[in-house]
Amino acid sequence: MSQLAEDVYSDPDFYFGVEEKVDEIIENSLKPITVDVDLEGRYPKEVLKSLGQSGAFMQHLSSIREDGFCDMGEAIKLMSKVSHECLSTGFSVWCQDACAWYIEVGSNNYLKENMLPKISSGEILAGTGMSNTMKAYADIEDLRLSGEKVDGGYIVNGSLPWVSNLGEDHMFGTLFAIDGDKDKPVMALVDCSSKGFELRLSAHFVALEGTRTFACIFNDVFIPDEMIIDHDGKSFMKKARFGMIMLQAGMAAGNIQACIDICKDNEARLGHVNAYLDDRPEELQEELDDLLDACIALAEDPYDTSDDHFKDVLQLRLTAGELTLRASQSAMLHAGASGYLIKAKAQRKLRESYFVAIVTPAIKHLRKQLAEMA
């Protein structure tokens, strides 16, 4: 464990007041730069570092927590607080949480002892390159990475179109197939400074531009055995899929609550005419509260690998995506012309909401998978 991680986790007050610390970071460090993150593509690196040091990235990690408890519900709640202000930053929190979760449920004790403390404390910032994997195993596209076993590790080739929360000093988790065989997958932690690995800026986005999203090019990249999260990628996916998708509820909940708040903020000025709109704030609030109750109940059993349990989380994630779209449209209509200004919160939340709906697993992906499971 690094000195920073030791300093963070040895603080006797570390496990108390995490929510208050996160609120303070949002108010003092994130709010002043939210518009720049959105419109200028500013990467909130220092905010993410501070969130890591506050304990925001380790609530769902039983191997890190002193009490040995996996509080995925708290991880979701903290992510929702960040996403309420800025979904770009909230998504980067999800990337960090997801990468840590991969190591947590993987079989590599070296990574658990040496890398997990650094990622969960924000000393190392990390992403997740699992969009292609999830689509491949849902028969939407082919696996893009192929590996060959060599002495001491694997040589990996291929490319991933978009992976977020990355930089030359970052890491990310991804899966590759041995000799291109999808039935022989391996899960790895990739160091972005590896020889033969390239980050390529290939696109600009209407929202989430501040997430450091790159194409990842693998040209004979050597990944040593010590960086393999799990040599049995199939078993790993069964263990990781719940947390990977469940944690995304934090992004949705934060965006939905922000949209409800926008509706409420316009009541004094426009309530007499907004009363004729659909999806009024009190209706949306009731649906969000029900969604969060279901979310917390599901999150109580994060290690259940059964298909029935996974089906429940897919349905919850679909409901969250659909409610996000309704809430953001309602916020835009409740705000009216004032929400159409370039720095207005309503139009930013509208653009962000579409990301919740299309990020893997997208609404169409979820509906396909649920239909097949039914």
Image (spheres, rainbow, N blue to C red):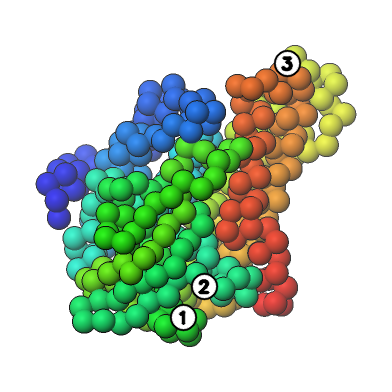
What is the distance, in whole Å, between disc 1 and disc 3 at their CAs?
60 Å
Identity, as a three-letter code, of the amino acid under mark 1: Gly
Residue 207 pos. (x, y %): 58, 38
Q: Residue at x 74, y 37 (%)?
A: 329
Mark 2 belongs to which amino acid? Leu
Q: Is mark 1 on a helix, strand or loop?
A: loop
Q: Mark 3 or 2 closer to N-term?
A: 2
Mark 3 to mark 2: distance in Å? 52 Å
Would you say the residues marked 2 and 1 are in contact, meaning their CB atoms lie under 8 Å apart?
yes
Mark 1 closeness class: few <14, some 14–19, many ≥20 residues within 10 Å: some
Q: How many labels does the image show?
A: 3
Question: Dot 2 corresponds to which residue?
Answer: 143
**Residue 233: x percent and y percent?**
41, 78
Residue lying at the far right of the rendered structure? 276
Tell which of 106 and 358 is nearer to you.
358
Q: Residue 268 carries which label?
A: 3
Residue type beneath disc 3: Ala
Residue under label 1, please give it: 180
- Residue 96 at x, y percent in the picture: 38, 51
* Residue 172 shown left or right of residue 135 in the figure: left
Q: Quadrant of residue 280?
A: top right
How many residues crowd around disc 2 within 10 Å: few (fewer than 14), some, or many (20 or more)? many
Q: In front of the other: label 1 or label 3?
A: 1
